[in-house]
Structure formats: structure tokens, C-alpha cells
Image (cartoon, rainbow, N blue to C red):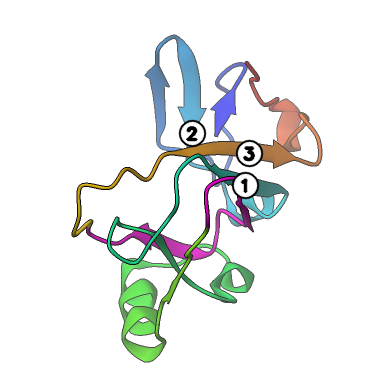
């Protein structure tokens, strides 16, 4: 998550700086307060690398690599096929990935994240553009 400043807090990190903005991997509690809206500028089709999700996995919090592998083997992912102008709302904690594109068709998406507050635990504050 982009943050105004670094404050070492349990569950936050590793930290990085990209284009002058401080980022940290956030704990599940913070990520559960965020929703992402994916506005599709092009059709998302089966052949151009659509987003794939495993529904309901956002309820399980942060997952270890072992947990991810187990869930991927246990459940079928769902392709998010969306026409241009459509919107997908998702929680960042849901297991997701883009599938491999099998065509040259573009799949441009505007990804916008919203949080219920700029204020996070321990005085951390989200950075906004």
C-alpha cells in the first residue's frame, strides 16, 4: 500500500520506495478495508488474458505460499470476462492472477483502489495522488 511515511509496525513490510512514494506490504486487516474497481477500457475475453479469481478466498486473510497452492489445486478459478466499459469490483485479498494472453487483442484496465479511510493503524496514513 502507498503510505505517506514509513513507520515500522508489526505486520507491515517489507518496505520499498517507488517514484518517491513509500510502499509496504500490508496486513490482512488493512487490506480488508480496501476495494479495487477495475474499469475495462477494452473487452476482456477468454483469449486476451482475463483476470482469474478464486471466489471467497478474500475471507481467509493473508495466505502462505502453501495455502495458495492448496486452494489453487482445490478450486477452479473463474475468468472475469467483461465488456469494454464494464467494471469488476474485487477485494485485494482474493486470490487472483491474469491468465496468459492467446491473442494480440488489447486488455487495458484502469485499476482504482478505495479504502474506507486514509488513516491506518499506528498513525500510518495512505498516500494519495
Asked if labels 1 and 2 touch by Cβ distance under 8 angstroms, the answer is no
Q: Which residue is mark 2?
A: 24
Compared with 126, 42 (above or below) is below
Q: Are marks 3 and 2 in contact (CB under 8 Å)?
A: no
| Corner quadrant of residue 100 | bottom left
SS at mark 1 in the image? strand
Q: Residue at x 50, y 39 (%)?
A: 41
Q: Are marks 1 and 3 in contact (CB under 8 Å)?
A: yes
Which residue sits furthest top? 20
Residue indicated by mark 3: 113
Q: Does 1 appear above or below 51? A: above
For the residues marked 3 and 2, what is the alpha-carbon distance in whole angstroms? Answer: 15 Å
Residues shaded magenta: 83-100
Tell whether 125 sits left or right of 51: right
The residue lying toward the viewer, choosing from 58 and 3, is: 58
Q: Secondary structure beneath disc 2?
A: strand
- Going from N to C along the chain, the mark reached first, 1 or 3, is 1
In the displayed structure, would residue 46 be above or below residue 49? below
* Residue 33: x %, y % from top left: 73, 49
Q: Which mark is residue 36?
A: 1
Q: Nearer the viewer, residue 4 or 89?
A: 89
Q: Horizontal placement of 95 versus 102: left or right?
A: right
Disc on the earlier residue, 3 or 2: 2
Disc 3 packing (10 Å; few <14; some 14–19; many ≥20)? some
Amino acid at each position: 500500500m502507498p503510505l505517506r511515511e514509513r513507520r515500522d509496525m508489526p505486520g507491515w513490510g517489507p518496505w520499498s520506495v517507488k517514484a518517491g512514494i513509500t510502499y509496504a506490504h500490508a496486513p490482512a486487516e488493512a487490506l480488508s478495508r480496501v476495494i479495487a474497481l477495475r474499469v475495462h477500457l477494452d473487452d476482456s475475453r477468454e483469449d486476451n488474458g482475463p483476470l482469474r479469481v478464486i471466489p471467497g478466498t478474500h475471507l481467509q486473510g493473508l495466505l502462505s505460499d502453501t495455502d495458495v497452492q492448496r486452494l489453487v489445486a482445490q478450486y477452479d478459478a473463474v475468468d472475469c470476462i467483461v465488456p469494454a466499459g464494464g467494471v469488476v469490483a474485487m477485494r485485494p485479498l482474493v486470490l487472483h492472477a491474469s491468465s496468459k494472453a492467446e491473442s494480440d487483442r488489447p486488455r487495458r484496465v484502469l485499476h482504482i483502489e478505495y479504502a474506507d479511510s486514509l488513516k491506518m493503524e499506528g498513525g500510518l496514513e495512505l498516500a494519495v495522488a
